[in-house]
Image (cartoon, rainbow, N blue to C red):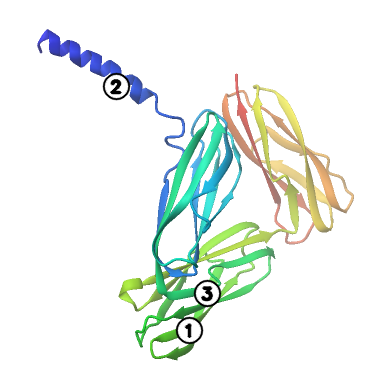
Amino acid sequence: MPRTLLSAFFWICLAVAPAQAQQPWHATIFAEKSHDFGTVARGSKVRHAFKLVNNTGYDIHIADWRTKCGCTDVKVGARDIPPGTQTTIEATLDTTKFQGYKASGLVLVMDRPSFVEVDLGLTSFIRGDVMLSPGAMDFGIVPRGSKPVMNLTLNYFGGTPNWGITKVQTISPNLSATAKEISRSGGTVQYQLSATLEPSTPAGYFKDEITLLTNDGSIASIPVSVSATVQAAVSVAPGVINFGHVKPGQVVKKTVLVRSNQKFKVAGASSAKPELKAAGATDEEKPFHTLVVELTAPTQSGPFNATLEIETNLKDEPPAKLTAFATVVP
């Protein structure tokens, strides 16, 4: 290779290498930054959760967000995300006032480790001749072990005389659903969709989707979002503890409240990781107990997380769970 070309190649490599090395910290924290719901019925409230995984070496903080239209609602999980942990940004698109192609979404604002705005997009095609009322099945807060039922109505105005729902599918075994034809007149059809949340549903936030399969080639399936907050008999507040930055071997403590709507006794608290433990349990039965959660930071630097399970004497009640995070720094 001539000397001048070799020299030029050398300087180009020097220019490219720093640019590749200086990848922004937020470049890989989202596996996806857009979601297409496909074809949906008008009136649907369709949900999608964007997962933020902190694979950096810094603490990430979500300062704020703004939506691209009033049809989008946002629910953010943890706003402080230590290294090695994750959270979700759930966006709900209300299609009631729209038909045809619709683009929406939100802009997520983060101010740590440095200020950045990330665009998260949503798209869908809203079918005007199929309408859901209400647009989603939200059971709200339900006691664990109960079996609530919820209904919604689907109306078809497309004009096809033999239009119909051929099959109903769910994702989770904890949810069952049926579709029953209520009326039919010419090309107008009405169905009642019933969904049942099974007693086996675990405590916490529950999310699923019902898929209605139809004999219509242009809209072969119709998604219906389902959500619920299943409340256990015993809860821990806070349910998530972030001990922040700790030194190897450092001992840090935080207080939590274990409570119920009935009197109970804390039988014990244990963790698969010996660095995390709790003290303060007594033999007294009462509707709330205060526990001191103690972390002895491991010697190895980096992110740390562990789950503490709190046993009670309530029959058939699973352990209440608490998740702890920390970042061990030299």
Residue 4 placed where, x, y %? 13, 10
When asked about the image quadrant of residue 111, the answer is top right
Residue type (three-letter) at the residue carrying disc 1: Gln
Mark 2 or mark 1, which has the lower sequence index? 2
Front residue (pair 130, 79): 130
In this picture, is 25 found above or below 118?
above
- Residue position marked by numbered label 3 in the rendering: 177
| Category of crowding for the residue at label 2, using alpha-carbon neighbours closer than 10 angstroms: few (below 14), some (14–19), many (at least 20) | few
- Residue position marked by numbered label 1 in the rendering: 190
Mark 3 or mark 2, which has the lower sequence index? 2
When asked about the image quadrant of residue 271, the answer is top right
Q: Helix, strand or loop at disc 2? A: helix
Residue occupying the point 9% across, 10% down: 2
In this picture, is 297 found above or below 9?
below
Q: Are marks 3 and 2 in contact (CB under 8 Å)?
A: no
Q: Helix, strand or loop at disc 1? A: strand
- Residue position marked by numbered label 2 in the rendering: 16
Q: Residue furthest left?
A: 2
Mark 1 or mark 3, which has the lower sequence index? 3
Q: CA distance from mark 3 to mark 2?
A: 56 Å
| Category of crowding for the residue at label 1, using alpha-carbon neighbours closer than 10 angstroms: few (below 14), some (14–19), many (at least 20) | some
| Category of crowding for the residue at label 3, using alpha-carbon neighbours closer than 10 angstroms: few (below 14), some (14–19), many (at least 20) | some
Q: CA distance from mark 2 to mark 1?
A: 62 Å
Residue type (three-letter) at the residue carrying disc 3: Ala
Residue occupying the point 56% across, 72% down: 134
